[in-house]
Image (cartoon, coloured by chain):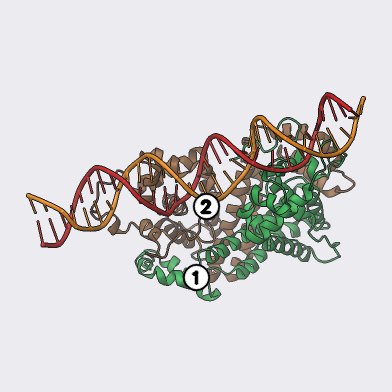
Chain colours: A brown, B green, C red, D orange
Amino acid sequence: MTDSSTGAGEPSRTLALLWGDPTLTAPRKGPRRSATPDQVVEAALSLADERGLAAVTVRAVAERVGVSAMSVYTYVPGKPELLDLMVDRLHLAMPRPPWRSRSWRRRLTDVAEANRALLTTHAWLTEVAALSRPPLGPGVMAKYEHELAAFDGTGLGDVETDAALTFLLGFVQSHCRSAHDAARATTDSAMSDADWWAANQPVLARALDPAAYPRAVRIGAAAGEAHGAAWSADAAWEFGLARTLDGLAALIDAAA
Amino acid sequence: MTDSSTGAGEPSRTLALLWGDPTLTAPRKGPRRSATPDQVVEAALSLADERGLAAVTVRAVAERVGVSAMSVYTYVPGKPELLDLMVDRLHLAMPRPPWRSRSWRRRLTDVAEANRALLTTHAWLTEVAALSRPPLGPGVMAKYEHELAAFDGTGLGDVETDAALTFLLGFVQSHCRSAHDAARATTDSAMSDADWWAANQPVLARALDPAAYPRAVRIGAAAGEAHGAAWSADAAWEFGLARTLDGLAALIDAAA
DNA sequence: CTGTACGCCGTACACCGTACAACGTATCGA
DNA sequence: TCGATACGTTGTACGGTGTACGGCGTACAG
């Protein structure tokens, strides 16, 4: 539990890092720096993508950059701040194609799918708290601006637009987190879905009593059969996105 | 990273614990047990509720139970399994009032609010992966069954019902996670929302450029002003739940 | 009564984030 | 030109985590 991520001395060195404060690149006194904050963030990102968030340790990042563990702290205030920088950098790299004159539903679908692609490529993102209080960096800002623009012409007010976007992104985040968890469960248990059910069949036979849980047993089986697995990411995505957009449609159509 | 949570020797001792396998209470050979698995789970739960998930360490749980750290492992296979037991126990304690003949919308609202209450009282639940691959214990099963019953009479098929429930719970989980994150951000930074903005005003003034991010700056300010904070949990809840139910209405009305 | 299976626990290991102090280096003020 | 000084780098160390291992004593089975 690392408390007080942003100290009190000088308020939020993280913000300075995020926005590339010029005082950071100004000539300093001591010996030449052997790396840059960017390299540290890049190393951490590649580690997270290749081996998961748990592999992002200060020591591992340091080794990848080619400095000692403690030197990392001269580039980045601490680990929580490093995570913030990673998140913002990823958001900065997202594509932001101009919104053509398509329907709002098409545009919001694009928003959702872009976010799904991000959270699929970098699944560890679902493990860091990035939704409610994201780092206010250039990447997050640019993404926010771009996604808000997708609501142009919907007739929604400012407050409603913000709430609608949060709602949409909440669905994407929630879905991708589930997908990530499911993938990890089968991955690092080295046990397939079917194997698990087979191995635990004796215990489960008594537990999953159709008399006690009629709907649960029947529906659980039906869902598993329909998707070929206990949980299908694609099916859940199709369903959830359609529902989410339908829900917003009720609001947007009323506004128009 | 604790791998292989459920070993290969005897498949899933966790399931036996979840379902109170009688072989567990049968008289054993050695000395009297000085505690029970239930007491361990209870201690862990109280710890999590009082001081957060990070305070749930094996050593802390052991101390609360009154045994040594390593003795905990004679009651519970390991920490991931302990978390599973905690989750199931909480779900078992949820109220399951019979569904009267109210509208489906009213029933689903009850489902959502019951889950919100759970995730608010035990906010740490949003930090454990409990949605996609929950522990198949009696609590989770009973909750699943009860919530599925809320869909009786909607005309939805089995697969659709399961997807709809997952969708609804996904919203609740996502919302409560954001609320939890937001609360933590202001809590353990010992810095109020306003203080933070004031302290970082100089940097933010240049960063939040209305020319670069016209919508973001305007809408961010509007949302903050409307709710008296950067993010209002209650407002987001009202909005999101209405949207979620509207989205399901499009499906359910079509089925009827 | 004895063998043995089992509960309990102290110690130890590998790993984490990071505080601290020593040391070398490059710039600035004189 | 020459300290003084500020800064980068690093090794060591501390307190924390989950848990493997082995010694010890207990209580039941024969």
Q: Amino acid at mark 1?
A: Asp
Q: Quarter holding the C terminus of chain B? A: bottom right
In the foreground, B125 or D15 = D15
Between the C-alphas of marks 2 and 1, the distance is 33 Å
Query: Which of the 4 quarters of the picture holds residue A106?
Result: bottom right
Q: Amino acid at mark 2?
A: Asp
In the foreground, D27 or A94 = D27
Chain designation of label 1:
B
- Residue B108 position in % (x across, y down): 75, 62
Q: Secondary structure at mark 2?
A: helix
Q: Quarter holding the N terminus of chain B? A: top right
Q: Which residue is mark 1?
A: B193
Chain designation of label 2:
A
Number of callouts in the render? 2
Identify the residue at image location x=75%, y=58%: B252
Identify the residue at image location x=71%, y=40%: B77
Identify the residue at image location x=71%, y=37%: A228
Q: Secondary structure at mark 1?
A: helix
- Residue B41 position in % (x across, y down): 74, 51
Q: Is residue B236 visible?
A: yes
Residue A27 sits above or below residue A42 on the image: below
Identify the residue at image location x=24%, y=47%: A31
Query: Which of the 4 quarters of the picture holds residue A169?
Result: bottom right
Residue B238 sits above or below residue B64 on the image: below
Q: Which residue is mark 2?
A: A110
| For discs 2 and 1, the disc positioned in front in the rendered view | 1
- Residue B138 position in % (x across, y down): 81, 48
In the foreground, B206 or A114 = B206
Kindly indicate whether the residues beneath marks 2 and 1 are on one polypeptide chain.
no
Query: Which of the 4 quarters of the picture holds residue B8?
Result: top right
Q: Is residue B164 visible?
A: no
